[in-house]
Image (tube, grey):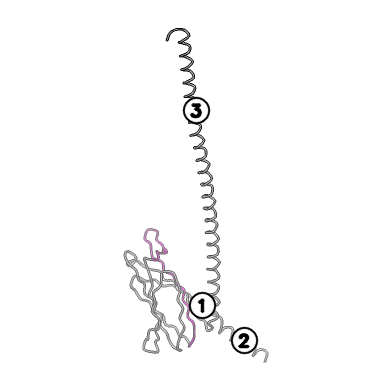
C-alpha cells in the first residue's frame, strides 16, 4: 500500500512538472518547417526560440537585428482537417504559448520572414518546447519573469533619480558660478569707473597745479 501511494504521487508529480525538449534546424528565407506533436486537451505548449544567420565573413552564425528578420508561427489541429488555431508573428528571439483546446495531433509550423541579404543566407533556428499540464506551472514562471522585470525597472528608476539629482546639483553649481561671475564682473566695472574718476580728478588737479605754477612764473 505504501509503495502504491508513492507511485501514485510520483505519477502526479511527473504529470504536473513541465517536460522540456529542444533542438535546432537550418532554414533559408521563406522556408517553412513543421513539427507534429501529440497533445491532450488543456495541455500547455510553450516554445522559446531564437534565430541566427550565417555570416560568411566570420564563418559563424550571428544574431541579426530585430528589424531584419522575423518568424511566422502557425499551430494546426491535424485531427480537425488541419484547422489553424494559432497564427502569429514573432521577432528573432522570443517565445509563444498555446493551450490545446482538444486532444489529438497538432502541427506546429515556423516560417522565417526576412528581406535583403538575409533572405539568401542560411538561418539557424533554435527551439525549446515545454509541455505542461498545469497552468500554474507556467504562471509561476511568468510571475518570476515579471518580478525580474520589475526589479530591472526599479534599478532603472533608481538610476534615473540619481542622474536627475546629479543634474540638479550641476544646475545649482552653474547658478552659483553665474551669480559669482556677475558679482565679480559688476565689481570690476565699478572698480574701472572709480579708477576713471580718480584718474580724471588727478588730471584736473595736475592741470590746476601746472596753471598755478605757470602763473607764478609769469609764463601765462
Q: Secondary structure at mark 2?
A: helix
Counting from the top left corner in percent of width and height, residue 98 is at 45, 81
Q: Name the quadrant containing residue 136.
A: bottom right
Residues at marks 1 and 2, CA–CA distance in whole angstroms: 21 Å
Q: Name the quadrant containing residue 13.
A: bottom right
Identify the residue position indicated by label 3 in the image: 195
Q: Secondary structure at mark 1?
A: strand
Q: Quadrant of the N terminus?
A: bottom right
Counting from the top left corner in percent of width and height, residue 163 is at 52, 55
Task: Judge by depth and name the residue closer to the eye, 54 or 208.
Answer: 208
Residues at marks 3 and 2 touching, judged by CB atoms closer than 8 Å: no
Q: How many marks?
A: 3
Counting from the top left corner in percent of width and height, residue 122 is at 36, 67
Residue at image coords 57%, 83%: 14
In the image, which disc is placed on residue 167? none
Task: Judge by depth and name the residue closer to the eye, 168 or 3.
Answer: 168
- For the view shown, which residue lies furthest in the top direction? 218
- For the view shown, which residue lies furthest in the bottom direction? 1
Q: Which badge, 1 or 2, is on the more N-terminal residue?
A: 2
- The magenta stretch spans which residues? 41-66
Q: Is residue 138 left or right of residue 33?
A: right
Q: Is residue 60 magenta?
A: yes
Q: Quadrant of the C terminus?
A: top left
Residues at marks 1 and 3, CA–CA distance in whole angstroms: 89 Å
Identify the residue position indicated by label 2 in the image: 9
Amino acid at each position: 500500500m505504501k509503495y502504491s501511494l508513492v507511485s501514485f504521487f510520483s505519477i502526479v508529480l511527473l504529470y504536473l512538472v513541465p517536460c522540456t525538449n529542444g533542438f535546432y534546424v537550418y532554414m533559408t528565407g521563406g522556408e517553412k518547417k513543421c513539427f507534429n506533436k501529440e497533445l491532450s486537451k488543456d495541455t500547455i505548449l510553450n516554445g522559446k526560440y531564437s534565430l541566427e544567420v550565417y555570416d560568411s565573413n566570420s564563418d559563424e552564425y550571428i544574431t541579426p537585428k530585430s528589424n531584419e528578420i522575423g518568424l511566422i508561427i502557425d499551430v494546426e489541429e491535424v485531427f480537425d482537417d488541419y484547422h489553424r488555431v494559432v497564427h502569429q508573428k514573432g521577432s528573432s528571439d522570443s517565445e509563444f504559448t498555446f493551450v490545446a483546446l482538444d486532444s489529438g495531433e497538432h502541427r506546429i509550423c515556423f516560417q522565417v520572414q526576412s528581406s535583403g541579404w538575409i533572405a539568401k543566407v542560411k538561418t539557424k533556428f533554435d527551439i525549446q518546447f515545454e509541455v505542461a499540464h498545469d497552468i500554474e506551472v507556467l504562471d509561476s514562471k511568468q510571475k518570476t519573469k515579471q518580478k525580474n522585470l520589475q526589479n530591472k525597472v526599479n534599478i532603472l528608476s533608481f538610476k534615473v533619480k540619481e542622474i536627475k539629482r546629479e543634474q540638479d546639483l550641476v544646475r545649482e553649481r552653474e547658478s552659483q558660478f553665474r551669480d559669482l561671475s556677475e558679482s565679480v564682473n559688476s565689481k570690476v566695472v565699478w572698480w574701472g569707473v572709480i579708477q576713471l574718476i580718480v584718474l580724471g580728478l588727478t588730471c584736473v588737479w595736475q592741470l590746476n597745479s601746472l596753471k598755478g605754477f605757470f602763473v607764478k612764473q609769469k609764463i601765462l
